[in-house]
Image: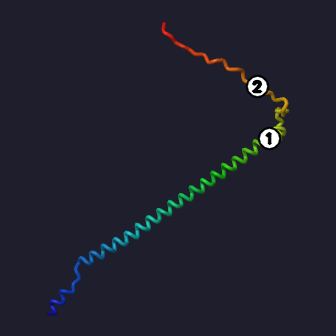
Amino acid sequence: MNRRRSTADKTPSSVFLTLILAALVATSGGVLHAVWKNRQILVERKIDATERRIEQHLLDIQITGVRMDEMLNRFELRERLRTAGSGLVSIEHGDIEEVVPAAQPAPAVASAGLN
């Protein structure tokens, strides 16, 4: 009877194989999770950098608009021309003359005929 008892207590090798396979699946799942999480973080960083660049460009556009408005300010433009010694002079409102274009003649039609 002791012989039968000692042979029946052996664990089948398929159990060990299943345990090893489960361990491999669990570790590879953890590694894949870490890889995907790192990729998500890299994409989020790229998105943040792009948003910062867009905000900087919008700010640059606003600053350029302000500078253009300052350059086109008529009073500052007059002062800059005066300090530069420009020969341009200001004109009075009464000096402006409206020019009306002459009536347009009917458009000419060209025809090519065979003789």
Mark number displayed over residue 82: none
Looking at the rendered structure, the secondary structure element under dot 1 is helix
In the image: residue 16, left or right of residue 67: left
Residue at which label 2 appears: 99
Mark number displayed over residue 74: 1
Q: Amino acid at mark 2?
A: Val
N-term mark: 2 or 1 = 1
Q: Nearer the viewer, residue 87 or 95?
A: 95
Asked whether disc 2 touches disc 1, contact meaning CB atoms under 8 Å apart, the reply is no
- Which image quadrant is residue 111 in? top right
- x%, y% of residue 114? 48, 9
Seen at 85% across and 30% down, the residue is 94
Q: Amino acid at mark 1?
A: Arg
Colour pattern: rainbow
Looking at the rendered structure, the secondary structure element under dot 2 is loop
Seen at 81% across and 29% down, the residue is 96
- x%, y% of residue 2? 16, 93
